[in-house]
């Protein structure tokens, strides 16, 4: 199974290198369109290789998706934490009630009753 994972990583790495080599040309990235930039009197522009733009977009999309999903699942995590607290409280109560049940009994009989 480990070799299959290494094979998948190698194939993915080769594909990324191929994309990077095929898209080495420099491109200009502008924050605002030319028509809108006239209103703000600035038009920042970055020049970088196309593969950096492609890979950066993929990474940004993954990060946004992870954060979005983490926020979306907040209710489920809160409910699981509430249930875990309730379960611990009930386990403590059961242990306390078992202790009260065997109060005043012979220790050996209490241990045998607890084991069953």
Image: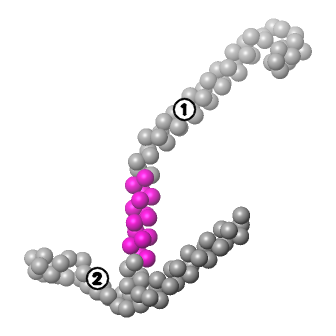
Judged by its main secondary structure, the magenta piece is: helix
- Disc number at residue 83? 1
The answer to which image quadrant residue 98 occupies is: top right
Magenta segment: 55-69
The quadrant the N terminus occupies is bottom right
Q: Residues within 10 Å of mark 2 (few under 14, many from 20)?
A: few
Q: Magenta segment: does it hold 60?
A: yes
Nearer to the camera, 39 or 97: 39
Classify mark 1: helix, strand or loop: helix
Q: Position of residue 82 (x, y in %)?
A: 51, 33
Q: How is the image coloured?
A: one colour
Q: Position of residue 15 (x, y in %)?
A: 52, 79
The answer to which image quadrant residue 112 occupies is: top right
Nearer to the camera, 72 or 86: 72
Q: Is residue 35 left or right of residue 76?
A: left
The answer to which image quadrant residue 42 occupies is: bottom left
Q: Is residue 52 left or right of residue 4?
A: left
Q: Which residue is mark 2?
A: 29
Q: Position of residue 55 (x, y in %)?
A: 43, 76
Q: Residue at coordinates 43% horizontally, 64% vertically from top-left? A: 63
Q: Is residue 108 visible?
A: yes
Give how far apart the Cα atoms at labels 2 and 1 are: 49 Å
Nearer to the camera, 95 or 33: 33
Q: Position of residue 102 (x, y in %)?
A: 78, 11
- Disc number at residue 75? none
Classify mark 2: helix, strand or loop: strand
Q: Residues within 10 Å of mark 1 (few under 14, many from 20)?
A: few
- Relative to residue 5, is residue 110 depicted above or below? above
């Amino acid at each position: 199974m480990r070799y299959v994972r290494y094979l998948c990583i190698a194939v993915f790495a080769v594909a990324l290198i191929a994309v990077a080599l095929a898209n080495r040309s420099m491109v200009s990235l502008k924050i605002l369109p030319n028509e809108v930039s006239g209103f703000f009197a600035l038009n920042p522009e970055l020049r970088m290789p196309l593969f950096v733009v492609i890979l950066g977009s993929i990474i940004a999309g993954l990060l946004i998706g992870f954060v979005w999903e983490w926020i979306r699942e907040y209710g489920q995590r809160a409910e699981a934490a509430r249930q875990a607290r309730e379960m611990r409280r009930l386990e403590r109560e059961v242990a306390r009630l078992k202790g009260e049940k065997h109060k005043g009994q012979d220790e050996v009989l209490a241990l045998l009753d607890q084991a069953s």
